Image: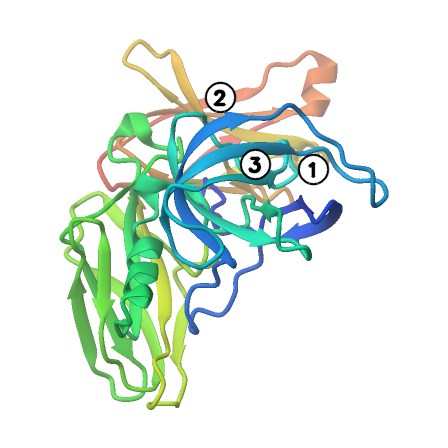
Amino acid sequence: MLNRRNSAKVLLAVLLLGGKAFACDCIASKPCGGLRTGDSDFTAEILSKSGVIRDESNGPSFPYLVFTMRVLESFGSNQKSGDIVKVRTGLGDGDCGYPFKIGEKYFVDSYLDATKTKRNTGLCSFTGSLGNRALVLRELRARKAGQRLPDVTGEVTRLGHTAAEAGTGVSNPMRGAQVVLHSSSSRTSLRAVTDTEGIYAFPHISPGTYSITMDHLPVGLEMSSVSVENYGDKDFSLVIPKEPSNNPECHVLISVDFSGSISGHISAAPEVLQDGAVFVSTQDASGKKVEDIDVDFSKNNGVFHVLHLPAGHYEIKFVSGLRKLTGKPSKTLSVDIGLGEQKNGIDISVR
């Protein structure tokens, strides 16, 4: 089953680096070994944006933008607080460009080109709004101060605090959440509680293989994914290397979402299923459609799953291209689910 926000998928795009176009592959790195930040990291306020630039001096390239920004806090020798620097990124239309906004503040995770004069960043980096980069900033500040980092640390975020935020991609740090680390060898468990920024830490962990769960989540919520740099699922296993003299510096991100779900089956001829699709939308009290929701639909056997739903009223619709050609109506069914309810066995028969 897929999370309806598809947060566990790999992002493939194109990033402009050094005046040339390269495939930008955001495949997850190993969970341990420290955060893989660039060689020019800092917080900054965006001052201005250039027009679209295309540098063909080294051959064909993709267009890009240049953002001018004021450095607020530096984590390296390539810039200092107060410097005015320029950072290049793509246009943001499938090319890995980061959508900076003038006047906003960001953590900028950038890489210098071969000449050490041009900074580049994009979606496949830790660049992000200053308010959403607490974990990265905490680690970089600790490194700067010469402090030892926890063996295992991470963030717990809740996707959609309210039904209105469900499916919007809005996430918030979850304070007071209980994270549990289970050892597969010793069969013991360790617990940590997230702070006000949603960050948890296990300072010292013995080598071995661990699974991660959460305890005492509020009714209607569940752990939806466990990931490393935006890639993973709930079956994630963490392996602490057998090098006790070294700090493993492992990072695990946890997402919490609504636990309601709808599952069912479309009964139809194979040719109708193969040419069809399932659509699910939320409805307000008057029955008006509010939001479309992504559906995991198997066209081979007609099974569908819709995950991470808040309590509410939903409309399920099966539409076949063949039915559109014949002018026959699609099949629609309305379903109500309560808080945390998993409604199974919904059958839609299409003749």
Rendered location of residue 32, percent (x, y):
42, 73
In the image: residue 347, left or right of residue 172: right
Q: Is residue 187 above or below residue 273?
A: below
- State the CA–CA distance, disc 2 to disc 1: 18 Å
First reached walking from the N terminus: tag 2 or tag 1: 1
- State the CA–CA distance, disc 3 to disc 1: 12 Å
Classify mark 3: helix, strand or loop: strand
* Amino acid type, residue under disc 1 in the picture: Gln
Rendered location of residue 101, percent (x, y):
45, 27
Residue at figure coordinates x 50%, y 44% from the top left: 6
In the image: residue 40, left or right of residue 211: right
| Pointer 1 residue | 274
Taking the view exactly as shown, the residue that stands out farthest to the top is 286
User: How crowded is the residue under tag 1: few (<14 C-alpha within 10 Å), some, or many (20+)?
Assistant: some
* Amino acid type, residue under disc 3 in the picture: Ser
Q: Is residue 211 above or below residue 70?
A: below
Rendered location of residue 74, percent (x, y):
38, 52
Which quadrant: the C terminus? top right
For the residue pair 83 and 136, the one nearer the viewer reads as 83
First reached walking from the N terminus: tag 3 or tag 1: 3
Residue at figure coordinates x 25%, y 88% from the top left: 186
| Pointer 3 residue | 267
Q: Quadrant of residue 314?
A: top left
For the residue pair 273 and 278, the one nearer the viewer reads as 278
